Amino acid sequence: MGRFAPSPSGPLHAGSLVAALASYLDARAHRGRWLLRIEDIDEPRTVPGADRVILRQLEALGLRWDGEPVWQTRRHPLYGRAFARLRAAGRVYGCACVRRELPPGPYPGTCRPAGAPRDTPQASAANAALPAGAPPHPAQRPIRSWRFLVEPGVETFVDRWLGPQSQDVAAEVGDFIVRRADGLWAYQLAVVVDDGEQGVTDVVRGADLLDSTARQRQLARALGLTPPRVLHVPLVVDAQGRKLSKQNHAPALDVSRPLDCLRTAWRSLGFAELPAATPQAFWPEATAQWARRFGAGGPHGAMSSPHP
């Protein structure tokens, strides 16, 4: 079971098509389903109508999803139940820190519980040591956000494109936010809950999200879920070497020439030009080549298995 999960902060561009194409081909090469999820959980960044534009772009390119699309903003009860489960298990804690107060690098654990209530003598002593006029120590302030209590040790996994990967989440990231100070659910929580609830077994996405994988694996296990297999594809960059993104004003895809769009995305994935003369001819040829490279019997497909 695969999925494509665009954020509706604008229309699809060349970079997002590469991720969509790879995830679609991977699902079809394994005779699986391909789901569409609109990741609009970050509501302040959502552009009204962008979700419908994305759906029309995918349809024009021939990327047909299975079942009905889902929108994260319609799934808040799911995230609330997952959060309650984490809280009951002692895997999340309230945090009063403000971003500008934190040093660069991993979260230093300022509000991390140490087996004592928030009004501990240690917190009071730290507060008393602050300069005159400084705000109270975070342990004495109201909770703003909620963080996931990460496990110590190195998280290891195999990426089907990049090979073996590892990250010490505690040392490199620290306890991360699952509910934001503005009350919104954080991306890390929402995506793990969605993948688990939808039965996603294989996540194919851009390499910019590789760094999130170890965090998401820890969160999935804490919720009793099996982490999906992952494959991270290369990013498309502009002339300055920056990742193509809506924030960098990447131009929207011109889907009036669908075959040109598909060919460009295909080449960005490192494949040779296909002889297909129409979009209809492109799909079976591309799916067969993807299966040879990333299918169950291909050199990079050992982590996947065909779906019935």
Image: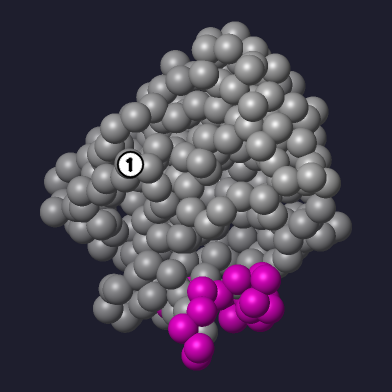
Residue drawn where x is 73% and y is 46% of the image = 131
Tell me what residue is drawn at x 51 percent, y 41 percent: 108
Tell me the element at label 1: loop
The magenta region covers: 239-263
172 over 274 or under it: above or below: above
Residue at left offset 26%, top offset 62%: 289
Q: Nearer the viewer, residue 69 or 95?
A: 95
The answer to whether residue 237 is magenta is no
According to the image, what is the colour scheme of the structure? Answer: one colour
State whether residue 230 appears in this view.
yes
Q: Residue furthest bottom?
A: 239
The front one of 245 and 171 is: 171
Q: Residue 96 at x, y = what percent? A: 71, 34
Position of 149 compared to 307: left or right? right
> Looking at the figure, which quarter contains the N terminus?
top left
Residue position marked by numbered label 1 in the rendering? 168
Residue 127: % across, % down: 70, 32
Q: Residue furthest top?
A: 88
In depth, the one of 204 and 66 nearer the eye is 204
How many other residues sit within 10 Å of disc 1, few (<14), some (14-19) or many (≥20)? some
Q: With respect to residue 122, does 1 lie above or below?
A: below
The C terminus sits in image quarter: top left
